[in-house]
Each structure stands twice: as structure tokens, then as C-alpha cells.
Image (cartoon, grey):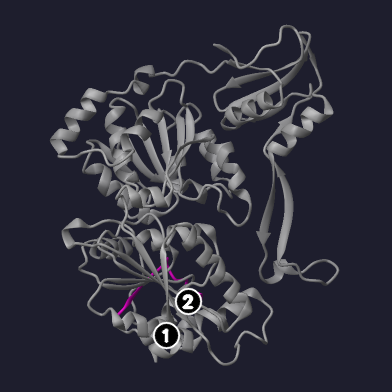
């Protein structure tokens, strides 16, 4: 198949040859292959190059000259050139590159040499079947869900990014897609084991023949729909027709992208993310490389206006302490340890707020297990949810008085049991690390306390997303987020201001509580 984006006779043009998930760009002048002109090559280079920032810790910060460096900056290219001067990259880059070249006045001819799919019927949407199944399930489309499905079902739509906030109804949308493409073999991937359990529960309630790989359980037998961790995708056979990746921004920084492209070389591929451009290390540029251009967008304000999520009120705790315990420290970890994780007065203020909501379900989000355990010393009725604690760290926490040695090990099975209990509101009070900042659905949760003090765009979207979900049965009308306005420290105050700006961009109400009111 040949698609002519723009033609100008036998003059100069770019020929894009796509085969599967690879594309090769060549330059022709009067029908003869030639090297790319310098200006055009620079245009392509700029579009496929990004700055990566790797944050260094411990011995890795030491440089040969004895100095210390906190960040290592490198330029990374998302393309290579062959011996003939043609440019090789991922097919996900092609739509944006074609638009870029077209805007620059350069004709582009796309030649698609991708072999016909082994099961072409897998991509034929069964709308009548979907309507019948939705009636049987007693379901209706939530706002814009049908629109998103129709984008996925467009002929020739082989990749793309779906950008929508938490609580858009993503897991339901995935289930509807599995019904719509009724014969397709579909893999649903996520980085986190806990999210595998959540997605498996949701999909198995909508679709027959759902398997699971990764987490506490593995279903070995082949299934039409399989939910798997990214780390276990090599165990799946390369005969899937469609691959959906949840929280796709989480996998773009490591080798998972390459593994994904090789493991599912023939499948259509789509990534879901509320923050496709929010990674602090700069690797968000790899989202397009892996999944193609953005094909669907919904913002936070629109989701609120459509009634998909509840309004949010952010209650800032103005923490104005005398003295800065981080002053003697330069290391970022040491500053966080003494300024956030083990800051007794800061933790006491957070605990005071939590006790105001003893009758409500409350989730406190922290960055580290160390911080979670320090907070639990002041909130003994709370349980800590985290990844497995290593034996070395466990011994250190026992020596430091943060653990008494009798706590049960936090296994994937125990974490899944706690997740189910929190979803049903049987479990009411939890302090959790990032294992519960994303991909879990707590519809009844109305009070979230952010104790982490970070300024990551991803964390500023994913963490608050736990409290915005609707729960009509309980009459939930508002999501409440408590956050710390750390005005006692210039550095941490800057982070507070960044979080505040992102809350403001979502049009969330912000109110302030003085430290004296918490005493």
C-alpha cells in the first residue's frame, strides 16, 4: 500500500518504508537516492533526540577528579543511520515525522511493507456484540468512552497514546475493548504487580477467558485476554493481536520498551497514561517511540465537568517551624531524611490531621518505607503497605526503633489482600508508599494526605487520582487532599509551590490551615 502525503512530481522527497514496528526514511532527488541535506537531517535529528537526566546517589556521584555530581546528563537519539544514509527508527515516530516534514514543505511518500496480519478479522469491531454485552452487563458508556473506542477501531490505527486522568474509566474501557474486538488475542500489560490484580478482577468480571501472569498468581494455560506485568511479558507467546499498556510512562526509561517491541512484533500497541510527558529524567520522549502519537485526550477539568470525577479541595497545612534540621546536610537523601521522613514536628502535624478523620477512610502517601514507619509511630492504628522490605533494611529499622521485629512480611499476596479490604472499606487507615499511588481503585476514599513532599509531575497526578473517583452509593461529593506547605525550608517550600501550581492548573479549590490550629 502506498500513501502519498504530498507529491511534487520528480523533485525531492522523503520515502518512508514501514515494515512492522520499524521504519526507514530515505531521501530522493529526481527519483535518485541521495544523502539527506544537512538542514533536513538536522530537522529529523532534533525531532528524535532528547536529553536524559540520570540522578546519581552514593558512590556513583564521585567523579574521577574528586568532585561530586548529582545528575548525569546525556543526549539520547531515537534513531540510527545505515551505511546508505537512510534513517532507521520506530514506526511509532512516523505519524509525527510525516507531519513535521509536511509542515516544512517536504513531500513524504509512505510505503507500507508490513505483512498482512495472521488474523485480520481480529481488528474488525463487533459493535452489535458490544451493545448486546453491555445490555447484559447493565452498563452504559461513560462520557467519551465510545469516542475513544471508535478511535481505536479506526482502520489503520495501529498505535497511539490515550491521555486521560485517573478515574476516566480506563479498566472499564479496556474491558469494553476486549468485548469489541471479540476474536482478538489481547495482552494488557502494567509494570506493577498490584495493578495486575486490579485489572484482572475488573476484566474477568466483563470478559470470559481472562488469564493472569505476574503478581501472586499465574494462569499458565493460554487465554484470549491476558493481564501481565511487563517483567513477565517474555513468558507470553508472540501471537497477540493487540497490546494495551497501563501507566505506559512507567516503562519508557528502561529496556522494557525494546523488550516490548520485540515480544509483540506483530501486534497493534496502545499506551494509557495521564502524564505521558511528565518524567523528570526526560525519557518521556520515548513514549512516542514506543506507542506513537497521542490519539485521545481528556483533561482534569473536562473530567470534572462531565461528572466522571468528584471536585477536589486541597487543604494546605502551613508548617512554619523554628529552625531547619536539614541545614547541616547537602546530600538530597540526607535532606529528605531529616526534613521529611524523620522530621518529628512535621510528622506530628500530619498525624494530628489524620486523627481528625478517625471516622473516615484515610490514605497517607509517602515516598519511603522509612517515612511510613516513622509516621506509624505516631499513628499506631494505621498499617503500612509497601514493597517487600529487605532483611538488611528490616534489621536497621528494628535497631532504630521503627519496627519491633514481629511485623509479618509484606508479600504480594498480603498486599493484594489489603488492597481488596481497602477497596471494600473494611480497612480504613493506611500509610502507603508508591505501590498504592497508581493503578489502584479506591472509590470510597475521600481523604488523602500527601506526606511525600515531592514535586514530580507524575506523582502530582497519580497520587491525587486515588481520591477523585466517584462513589454514588456513599454519597461522596468531594475529594479532600491534605498537603504540606513547607515554609520552614526554602528548598521544600519551592516543591510545595510547584505542587500548588499543578493543583491550580486542575482548577482545584485550595484552602490553608495554620500550624497553630493543629497543636
The CA span between labels 1 and 2 is: 9 Å
Q: Secondary structure at mark 1?
A: helix
The image quadrant where one finds the C terminus is bottom left
**Residue 217 place in picture, x, y as percent:** 31, 51
Which one is earlier in the sequence, the residue at label 1 or at label 2?
Answer: 1
Instruction: Give the labeled residue for mark 2.
Output: 484
In this view, the residue in front, 95 or 183, is 95
The image quadrant where one finds the N terminus is top right
Q: Is residue 414 shown left or right of residue 138?
A: right
| Residue 222 in view here | no
**Is 390 in the magenta?**
yes
Mark sitting on residue 349: 1
Count of numbered labels shown in the rendering: 2
Figure quadrant of residue 429:
bottom left
Local crowd size for mark 1, using a 10 Å CA cut-off: few (<14), some (14–19), many (≥20)? some
**Residue 44 place in picture, x, y as percent:** 72, 32
Q: Is residue 7 shown left or right of residue 518?
A: right
**Residue 323 place in picture, x, y as percent:** 59, 91
**Residue 507 place in picture, x, y as percent:** 43, 59
Residue depicted at 51% across the width and 72% down the height: 453
| Residue 279 in view here | yes
- Whether 95 is drawn above or below 115: the answer is below
**Is 309 in the magenta?**
no
Figure quadrant of residue 179:
top left
In this view, the residue in front, 13 or 395, is 13
Residue depicted at 35% across the width and 45% down the height: 170
Figure quadrant of residue 462:
bottom left
- Whether 342 is drawn above or below 39: the answer is below
Q: Are marks 1 and 2 in contact (CB under 8 Å)?
A: yes
Residue depicted at 30% across the width and 37% down the height: 221
In this view, the residue in front, 512 or 185, is 512
Which range of residues does the magenta coloring cover?
A: 381-392
Amino acid at each position: 500500500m502506498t500513501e502519498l502525503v504530498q507529491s511534487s512530481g520528480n523533485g525531492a522527497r522523503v520515502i518512508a518504508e514501514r515494515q512492522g514496528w520499524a521504519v526507514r526514511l530515505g531521501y530522493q532527488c529526481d527519483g535518485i537516492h541521495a544523502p539527506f541535506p544537512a538542514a533536513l537531517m538536522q530537522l529529523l535529528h532534533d525531532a528524535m533526540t532528547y536529553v536524559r537526566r540520570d540522578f546519581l546517589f552514593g558512590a556513583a556521584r564521585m567523579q574521577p577528579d574528586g568532585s561530586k555530581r548529582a545528575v548525569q546528563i546525556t543526549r539520547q537519539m531515537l534513531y540510527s543511520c545505515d551505511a546508505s544514509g537512510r534513517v532507521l527508527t520506530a514506526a511509532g515516530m512516523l505519524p509525527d515525522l510525516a507531519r513535521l516534514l509536511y509542515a516544512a514543505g517536504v513531500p513524504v511518500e509512505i510505503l507500507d511493507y508490513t505483512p498482512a496480519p495472521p488474523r485480520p478479522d481480529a481488528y474488525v469491531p463487533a459493535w452489535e456484540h458490544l451493545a448486546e454485552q453491555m445490555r447484559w452487563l447493565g452498563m452504559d458508556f461513560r462520557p467519551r468512552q465510545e469516542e475513544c473506542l471508535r478511535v481505536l477501531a479506526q482502520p489503520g490505527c495501529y498505535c497511539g497514546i490515550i491521555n486521560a486522568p485517573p478515574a476516566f474509566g480506563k479498566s472499564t474501557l479496556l474491558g469494553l475493548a476486549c468485548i469489541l474486538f471479540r476474536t482478538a488475542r489481547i495482552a494488557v500489560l502494567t509494570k506493577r504487580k498490584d495493578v495486575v490484580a486490579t485489572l484482572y478482577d475488573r476484566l474477568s468480571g466483563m470478559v470470559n477467558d481472562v488469564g493472569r501472569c505476574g503478581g501472586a498468581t499465574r494462569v499458565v494455560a493460554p487465554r484470549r485476554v491476558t493481564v501481565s506485568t511487563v517483567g513477565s511479558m517474555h513468558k507470553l507467546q508472540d501471537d497477540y493481536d493487540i497490546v494495551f499498556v497501563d501507566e505506559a510512562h512507567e516503562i519508557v526509561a528502561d529496556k522494557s520498551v525494546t523488550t516490548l517491541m520485540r515480544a509483540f512484533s506483530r501486534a497493534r500497541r496502545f499506551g494509557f497514561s495521564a502524564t505521558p510527558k511528565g518524567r523528570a529524567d526526560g525519557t518521556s520522549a520515548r513514549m512516542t517511540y514506543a506507542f506513537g502519537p497521542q490519539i485521545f485526550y481528556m483533561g482534569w477539568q473536562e473530567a470534572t465537568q462531565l461528572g466522571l470525577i468528584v471536585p477536589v479541595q486541597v487543604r494546605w497545612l502551613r508548617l512554619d517551624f523554628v529552625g531547619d534540621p536539614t541545614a547541616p546536610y547537602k546530600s538530597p537523601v540526607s535532606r529528605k531524611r531529616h526534613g521529611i521522613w524523620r522530621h518529628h514536628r512535621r510528622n506530628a502535624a500530619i498525624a494530628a490531621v489524620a486523627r481528625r478523620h478517625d471516622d473516615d477512610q484515610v490514605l497517607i502517601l509517602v515516598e519511603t518505607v522509612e517515612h511510613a514507619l516513622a509516621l506509624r509511630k505516631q499513628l499506631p492504628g494505621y498499617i503500612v503497605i509497601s514493597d517487600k522490605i529487605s532483611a538488611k533494611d528490616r534489621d536497621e529499622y528494628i535497631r532504630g526503633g521503627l519496627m519491633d521485629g514481629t511485623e509479618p512480611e509484606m508479600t504480594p499476596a498480603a498486599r493484594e489482600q489489603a488492597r481488596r479490604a481497602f477497596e471494600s472499606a473494611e480497612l480504613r487507615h493506611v500509610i502507603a508508599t508508591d505501590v498504592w499511588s497508581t493503578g489502584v481503585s479506591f472509590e470510597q476514599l475521600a481523604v488523602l494526605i500527601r506526606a511525600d513532599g515531592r514535586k514530580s509531575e507524575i506523582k502530582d497526578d497519580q497520587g491525587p487520582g486515588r481520591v477523585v473517583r466517584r462513589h454514588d452509593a456513599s454519597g461522596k461529593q468531594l475529594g479532600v487532599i491534605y498537603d504540606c506547605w513547607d515554609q520552614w525550608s526554602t528548598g521544600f517550600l519551592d516543591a510545595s509551590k510547584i505542587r500548588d501550581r499543578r493543583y491550580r492548573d486542575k482548577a482545584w479549590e485550595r484552602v490553608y490551615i495554620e500550624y497553630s490550629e493543629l497543636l
